[in-house]
């Protein structure tokens, strides 16, 4: 049996060298999985400290004007939780749209807005932004999220020359623009008759294409 199996293995490796990598990878994953399981037990003591480095194929500029943002903040920035969307609409089976009332959302689905109100004439949506949402402090102290950040991000993404993937999925009737009302309130203006009941999914969490809010201060100082 031993002599018969060796030629078969040599033939297999010769035909597909990637098999070696698969076997080695599987072999290496076993002790890693065991160590991970041990690390989770109560007897393992304090958790290890340090820096986790995540390998990615490409890291575009993460401080980028939303109108130019094809996938930098909307892809890597969102996937790695660097940026957040204004809401995260709960999944509902088509063709039913996401709930329009914020009270139908769980706390985990509210995103950067803690509440909102759709106008009775459907010509605007007024958002109340959460307090004390701190920006990552890479490259400087950017403070907390402001309504100016929200308006800047959406108005840039909605610009006529924008290549923002998330904005491209939204009809022009919904992209009239955002106005700052006060330090916690921002209003999205909508063309009369153009209200889209699926706005929460399109503007919040349509895959990697949800429109992310970026720090205007950080962009003004570091952005490209």
Image: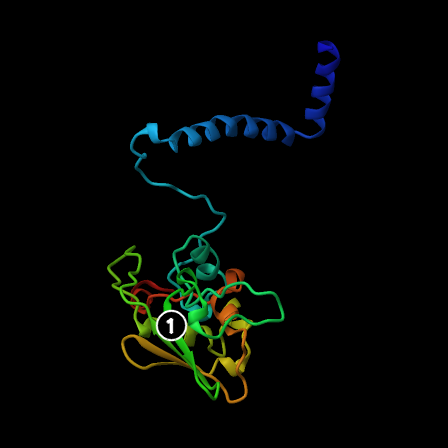
Q: Residue at x 41, y 79 (%)?
A: 117
Tally of numbered discs: 1
Residue 152 appears in view: no
Q: Residue at x 36, y 72 (%)?
A: 150
- Vertical placement of residue 167 versus 38, above or below: below
Q: Please name whichever residue, 27 or 117, is drawn nearer the observer in this view of the structure.
A: 117
Display coloring: rainbow
> Percent from the top left, x then y, of residue 177?
43, 81
Q: Is residue 119 left or right of residue 146?
A: right
> Percent from the top left, x then y, of residue 184?
29, 74
Question: Which quarter of the image is occupied by the C terminus?
Answer: bottom left
Residue situated furthest front in the rendering? 103
> Percent from the top left, x then y, of residue 197?
54, 77
Residue 73 appears in view: yes
> Percent from the top left, x then y, of residue 202?
52, 70
- Vertical placement of residue 81 versus 87, above or below: above
- Vertical placement of residue 113 versus 33, above or below: below
Kindly state the secondary structure of the residue where label 1 is placed.
strand
Question: Which quarter of the image is occupied by the N terminus?
Answer: top right
Name the quadrant containing residue 77: bottom left
- Vertical placement of residue 6 versus 95, above or below: above
Q: Which residue is mark 1?
A: 115
């Amino acid at each position: 049996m031993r002599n018969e199996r060796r030629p078969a293995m040599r033939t297999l490796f010769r035909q597909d060298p990637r098999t070696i990598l698969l076997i080695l990878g599987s072999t290496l994953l076993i002790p890693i999985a065991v160590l991970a399981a041990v690390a989770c037990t109560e007897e393992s003591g304090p958790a290890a400290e340090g820096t986790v480095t995540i390998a990615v194929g490409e890291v575009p500029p993460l401080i980028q004007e939303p109108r130019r943002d094809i996938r930098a903040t909307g892809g890597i920035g969102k996937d790695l939780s660097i940026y957040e969307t204004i809401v995260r609409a709960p999944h509902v089976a088509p063709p039913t749209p996401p709930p329009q009332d914020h009270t139908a959302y769980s706390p985990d689905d509210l995103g950067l807005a803690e509440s909102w109100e759709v106008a009775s004439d459907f010509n605007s949506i007024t958002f109340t932004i959460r307090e004390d949402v701190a920006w990552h402090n890479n490259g400087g102290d950017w403070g907390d999220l402001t309504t100016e950040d929200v308006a800047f991000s959406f108005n840039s993404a909605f610009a006529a020359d924008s290549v923002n993937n998330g904005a491209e999925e939204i009809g022009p009737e919904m992209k009239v623009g955002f106005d700052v009302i006060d330090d916690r309130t921002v209003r999205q203006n909508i063309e009369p008759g153009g209200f889209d009941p699926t706005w929460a999914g399109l503007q919040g969490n349509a895959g990697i294409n949800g429109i992310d809010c970026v720090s205007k201060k950080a962009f003004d100082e570091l952005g490209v």
